[in-house]
Amino acid sequence: MKRLAAAVLLAASLLTARAAGTVRVFTRDTGGRPVADAVAYLSDPDSPAPVSPPADPVAITQKDQEFSPYVTPIVVGTKVVFPNLDNVQHHVYSVSPAKRFEIPLYIGDSKETIVFDRPGIVTLGCNIHDWMVAYVFVLSTPYYAKTGADGTAEVSGLPPGRYRLEVWHPRAGTVGRDLVVTESSDTTQVISVVLKPDHRIRRAPDAGGADYK
Amino acid sequence: MAEAPFRMFRFRRYGSRLLLLIVGLLVLALGANFALVVRANRRNANERIHADLDKGALLFTHRVNARLDDLSSRAALMSGDYAIRQLFLEDRTDPATVSSALETYRVRMGVPFMALLAADGSRLGDTGGPLAAAALKPFQDLVARAALEDDPKAHGYARLPPNGPAGMLYSLLVVPIYAPRPEIVAWIGLALPIDHRFATELKEDALLEVTFYYGASGAMSPVESTLPPAALAAAASSNIEEGDRTVSVGGEPYVTADRDLPLITPGRAAIALQRSLRAELEPSLVLERFLLILLLASLGVAAAVAPWFARNLSRPLRTLAEHTEVIARGDYTSRLKLDRVDEIGQLATAFDRMSEGLAERDKVRDLLEKNVSPEVAAQLMRDGSALGGEEREITVLFVDLRRFTAMSESLPPREVLALLNRYFDRMSGIVEIYHGIVDKYMGDEIMALFGAPVPLVDHANNAILAAIEMKSALARLNAELEAEGLARLKFGIGINTGSIIAGNIGSSRRLNYSVIGDGVNVAARLQNLTRMSQYEADILVTASTLAASKGRFRTRPLGAVPVRGRDMPVEIFAVDGAE
């Protein structure tokens, strides 16, 4: 996914050579610690940039009875597959308004390819494993990136102009600010978010009951 | 005046004082004991009740929480149910389907009412019935509150429907439906009635009376209670305030703890936990009654025993007092002889010793009086035996038997002495009658004093009268002696008035009260002169006696006679009798 976005951005930057700015976003919590898995995206509400979903589907795998990645930003119209690499079945579902679907119990390759055709946040769960949760952020802007473990996300290839920068995280919601991007912009925006307690269900280290006493 | 306040505590009898003391002390000690026990019992009962009420209030909270926890976990189980999730996979949830599905869960969970609300609080469906319309708003309020919580659920009390007489108190709960956690896709709302069963269960656990109150505004009235209806009616319009109070329920004091039940619907609700003070005090009252009986019994026993004890104590005292009277009357012979070793026994012994002392003193005085005249004895007892001396004017009288020595030779000595004593007895008696004293007996002679040691105004007069009386007495004695065939007695009396020195005369070991001086010699001389036949007189007095006597006597002047030791002759008179 990241590679894909990078490729898109590379293409865009090649097309508009030297006429693009870069915004780095450093996301941290109230304790100053970097926040990973935050989606940073920029949009110009007055003239939204068109998005073009990739041709190949994006994969959200199920391994060790967890979704991976935890957060997946995509643009509207992107196809997503859910390969199950575990040796137990999973039942992927979402009841989020942006995309309601379920893939009844299966194992191995994803039986279905789901097209996320509406912007919004889609929460994924597994009907038989309550602790499994993942998010798909369906965006209607091509300018986005996800923070890594260092809390940094870099969005490049931005045409000069006024933008609204927003950062979203499952435990923080959305925070944003307005900024102006010039041809030579190469700034780092520091975004502080308030993380709510992690309410994901904690699994025993060796779930499945093998060592359950 | 200062002792006036104590007058009321003066008692004629020692026993009354002792009785009052013992009974008073008993009343004080047992009364104080009783009062302290009663106070401690009341306080303990109150403290126990208050502690139990606090426990009861906690128990109520725990019961409610336990019920809510139970329902929460059941709801959580239900919210993870596949079938529930299926309802939300529909593009448009069908309210009728949702409601009918909820009915299944309502029956499974055993609650009277259940509702499903969307994440934003809007109604998705419910199990219908009279609560459906009324419960929506309270549930929405709870959803708004729960959404802010870390553990998103909320509980509250509500009256449903909020208005109208049919309203009942409910405990409401909302819990989330996750898809998956922590994403809340909907809320389940549950209603549990606070009904008689709930109150009764609480009563069985807490052993307290439980009453739930509700009031739209101001006064509150009971809506559910474990109290009997009659008692409840009395507490109908109680003014309930958070805290503890004591109320009268059916005439019985109940300690009551009121706790507000915060309502999410209008109005006020409260729970009152009560326990009867009398029931709590029942074991203490038994003890108090026993103490009271003990107090009264002790008083009774004390009242009965104290007089006996007092009598026992005062009887020897009274005996002592009576014995004192006996001693005061002069009887030193009787003895107390109390067989006791205590203080009273010691006192009795001291009394007896005193009696002995007094008796001894009496004996001494008696002997003294026999040896000296009673007047001298009295003076000796009074003034001691100082070798004093004083000059004063008195009258001295000498009386001597004539030819007694010759007469006595013809009689056995015993009879001589008997005759002499008989004579002395008569003469001495007359001296005493006229307030004189017998100073001494010298052979058959008597020396008598008038005016010493006790001053006597009419000493000269008394002496002459005594002499005349002696003469008559002798005549009577002679008549007796004649009748007995004995010889007649004759005597001669010499009387003189003059200045003498009186006092205790002798050594410090042996003393005689006596008088010395010229006046004494003259009297003795006159007695001798009675032997002179030419005078024909048994009684001779000097002019000075006659002058001092102021009495009227038949006298004959016998002229002046020379007296040894005197330059001037003394004028003498014969006294033949009283005029």
Image (cartoon, coloured by chain):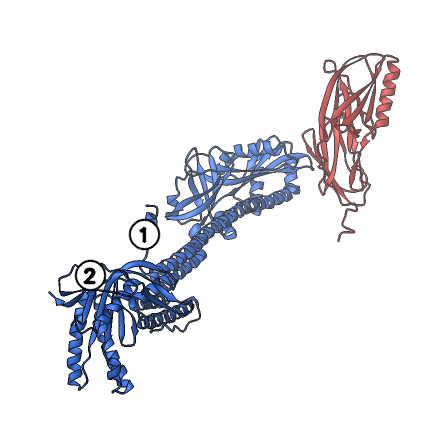
Chain colours: A red, B blue
Mark 1 neighbour density, 10 Å: few (under 14) some (14–19) many (20 or more): few
Amino acid beneath label 1: Met
Which residue, given by chain and number where applicable, does mark 2 sit on?
B543
Residue B219 appearing in the image: yes
Rendered position, B232 above or below B387: above
On the rendered structure, is B570 left or right of A57? Answer: left
Rendered position, B38 above or below B103: below
- Quadrant housing the C terminus of chain B: bottom left
Q: Residue A147 sits in which quadrant?
A: top right
Q: Residue B409 sits in which quadrant?
A: bottom left
The disc numbered 2 marks a residue on which chain? B
On the rendered structure, is A42 left or right of B232? Answer: right
Query: Mark 2 or mark 1, which is nearer to you?
Result: 2
Which residue, given by chain and number where applicable, does mark 1 sit on?
B8
Give how far apart the Cα atoms at labels 2 and 1 are: 72 Å
Amino acid beneath label 2: Ala
The disc numbered 1 marks a residue on which chain? B
